[in-house]
Amino acid sequence: MKATKAAFVSALAGLAVLGIHSGARAQQAEPAPPEGPQYPQADAPPQNSPPPAPAAAPPYEAQPVYPPGYGPPPGYAPPQGYAPPPGYGPPPPRYYAPPRAYGRPRYAYYPPPPPPPPYSLERPFMLGGSLGLATLHYHPGDGTSTSDAAVGYSARLGFGLSPRLLFLIEINGATASGSDGYYGSVAFDQTIYDLGLQVFLTRRLFLRGGAGLGNIRAWDDGGTFDARTGFAMTASVGLELLQGYNWSFELAGQWITGFYSDGNWTSGAVNLGFNFF
């Protein structure tokens, strides 16, 4: 009796499970129609259709390759999705190797020498000389006068006292020659040895003057026959025509007067001179 009940209960449970599965399959096979008007759906894919194919990949575009150190041509724009390379920092510092004791020699560059300083009137030392045309006059005590053409000459040694003032040690004079009916050819000169000063009024214009010992001589074909000594003075005014860094070329007018026992001797000259300092 118990076995019959157990079999009966098992049969009912199997029927219940079979009924539940049958109802679920029926609901999936025949869905309930939706309420309201129905319209066709054109874009809806048909049932049981294969899945859509994946979209085709865009064709591969080769990127241009440029030589090292060259960029893209003007007007060129990089393709979409192109990322420029990362930027670079400052270049590394240059390294200069020390000169080697072997191999190819290295030559150092020396700048040109600086130009000489401009011309200056400051002359710590000066050496000069002049030569030109002159006249020599003799004035004896009786009031008569004798004049002859002569050659003027001058030599000087200077020491700077200030930028425009020099102390001078000079030799100045003039020499002339003539003829005499009794003595034949006669020559005579006047030379003074003086101490003086030279001052520049402007850069080129100067005054020069001094005083010292004067000496006159006269001689003929037979030799010197007269020589006297006295006090003499000299004065000059001149212009330096050319001026260099350590030299100058001058034109000067000179006047010399000597006082002697038998009269006065004077000479005037226009001399061209050169100075080195």
Image: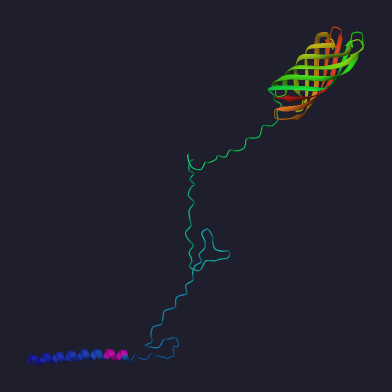
Give percent across and percent down for residue 62. Answer: 49, 69
- Residue 259 coordinates in the image, percent (x, y): 83, 10
Please give left or right for residue 29 compared with residue 157 in the image: left
Is residue 40 depicted above or below 191 in this figure? below
Occupied quadrant, residue 20: bottom left
Residue at 75 percent of width and 25 percent of height: 274
Residue 27: say if magenta: yes
Q: Quadrant of residue 265?
A: top right
Q: Nearer the viewer, residue 59 or 69?
A: 69
Q: Quadrant of the C terminus?
A: top right
Q: Quadrant of residue 158?
A: top right
Is 57 a magenta residue?
no
x, y percentage for residue 107? 55, 40
Residue span colored magenta: 23-28
Return the residue nearer the eye: 163 or 46. 163
Vertically, is 14 above or below 229? Answer: below
Screen quadrant of the N terminus: bottom left
* Dominant secondary structure (helix, strand or loop) of the stretch shown in magenta: helix
x%, y% of residue 212?
Answer: 77, 12
Please say which color scheme the image uses.
rainbow
Q: Nearer the viewer, residue 175 or 254?
A: 175
